[in-house]
Image: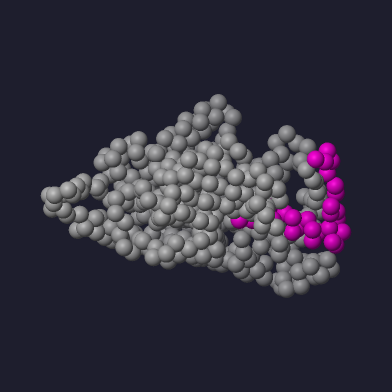
Amino acid sequence: MTLLYEGREWNFDKVRRAHDAVSEIALDELGLDVYPCQVEVITFEQMLDAYASIGLPILYHHWSFGKRFVRDEVLYRKGFQGLAYEIVINSDPCLCYIMEENSMTMQTLVLAHAAFGHNHFFKNNHLFRQWTDATAILDYLSFARDFVSRCEDRYGVDAVERILDAAHALQMQGINRYTRRPKRSLADELARESERQAYLETTWNPLWSTLPGQKQEAPPAGVTVAPEDRAPSVEFPEENLLYFLEKNSPVLKGWEREILRIVRNLAQYFYPQRQTKMMNEGCATFVHYEIMNRLHEKRMIDDGAFIEFLHSHTSVTFQPSFEDRRYGGLNPYALGFAVMQDIQRICRDPTGEDRDWFPDIAGNGDPMGTLRDIWAHYRDESFLLQFLSPKVIRDFRMISLHGEEGRSYFEVAAIHDEQGYRSVRAALAREYECARIDPEIEVVDANMAGNRRLYLENRVHDGQRLDPPSLRATLQHVRNLWGYPVTLRETDARTGKRLSDGETEVS
């Protein structure tokens, strides 16, 4: 075989040859199924800009993005923070950004990691297939950018930022976790916006202001909500706070409701990524490891390039021990890659322990088919609950600790025995459950005909109360969007009893 490249320097011909070689292994040997991929080379400044706009190639303006850009740029230039080698967008075609500062080996690595590993996961995992529309996201981002820009020109930057600040503060409470509302294409969204504006224009009649004793001022554009956006009756409880405010706020204008809808849609777009962070990175890391090893076995990259790859790979999958100053929890790259390599081992060469724990896959001789099925049908929580093996628990030296409020010590609740493995696996899986991590806040009532007070309820799990200063600041954003007093009550999720001091009001 001929080497794909020699040395560190890259050019577009070398990148194309590497892409074609990686593609052949990924599609023909690993059996991956991917979107068409658009590879773009960017500078480190453009990578920082993508960091600032939460990894999206097109987005509306907001001061928080500039603040994040300045922070990351200072840390990068002072050497306190590195940059990702790539960014990949869940779209069709899949967008893969690679940095021009990368060496040719790193360009090959990130093509395998992002353009095929992440790409396959985006296209096939059921959460992404159910909750996101890869074909429409880029068009919707363009629509969102242009709409917000027009609002800034017409109503002023301060007015738009006030709505965006509130929407960003509440975006994790703007997600449909359990019920899926119909997905609409960009054309549908544009048509609905036009209908709302047309409804406003046809329902306002200046002649009514000429009647004696009557006064009708022309409302600002977009004040009235179109009939199809009005809920005939409000149903409680409502888990999606931003959706409730968008549809039922007495004070929001049409364009403000549209901005809430944009932020909601973007938060929903990222929700599957939050639920599959460890699996997604584990899939991409496993794929690039397999591809780079096969390129080296075929003599398509030399030993120097392979050593460079191994240095980068081991740095990404390094897991500091808990007493290490660098420890910040379990590395999703390390844990995901370890479990997927372990599944490959179980399929090929299982032990007696493996056959007891995983009788359905042990020794089936088809590791890639097994992994493709897992990548399609699981998320982080269910993946760990099903496939975290005793071997990986031992390799990572996991144990379960139990502590209670007021105690100065922890109790070792589970060790390396059969019951302990199950307890550790269940406890770790719970840590990846987004519905448990995010506060469970619902709209439980609203006095629509009287003082219009809005009532929220936070169901407290495991004694994890909301931070009072942050709670009051966030409720102020709710108050700004609702226009009237807001009350939040905290209740125990297990017993349903209201906590004695768990009520906060913002008038």
Q: At x 40% / y 51%, what residue is drawn?
A: 249
Q: At x 28% / y 44%, what residue is drawn?
A: 150
Q: In terms of depth relative to the viewer, which is nearer, 438 or 79?
A: 438
User: Could one spot residue 381 in this view of the protein?
Assistant: yes
Q: In terms of depth relative to the viewer, which is nearer, 440 or 491?
A: 491
Q: At x 71% / y 51%, what residue is drawn?
A: 462
Total numbered labels placed on residues in the image: 0
In the displayed structure, does residue 503 sit left or right of residue 345? Answer: left
Does the magenta segment cover residue 296? no
Measuring from the top left, give residue 48's x and y in whole percent: 47, 37
Measuring from the top left, give residue 303's x and y in whole percent: 64, 46
In the displayed structure, does residue 167 sit left or right of residue 7? Answer: left
Q: At x 53% / y 56%, what residue is drawn?
A: 444
Most extreme residue toward the top is 78
In the displayed structure, does residue 416 sit left or right of residue 208? Answer: right
Give the answer, above or below, for where 438 lies relative to 351. Answer: above
Measuring from the top left, give residue 282's x and y in whole percent: 63, 54
Q: In terms of depth relative to the viewer, which is nearer, 94 or 322?
A: 322
Instruction: State the scheme by which the image is colored.
Output: one colour
The magenta segment: 406-435
Q: In terms of depth relative to the viewer, which is nearer, 188 or 120?
A: 188
User: Could one spot residue 49 in this view of the protein?
Assistant: no
Measuring from the top left, give residue 289's x and y in whole percent: 63, 54
> Which quadrant, please, contains the N terminus?
bottom right
Q: Quadrant of residue 155?
A: top left
Most extreme residue toward the front is 213
Does the magenta segment cover residue 422? yes
In the displayed structure, does residue 194 sit left or right of residue 291? Answer: left
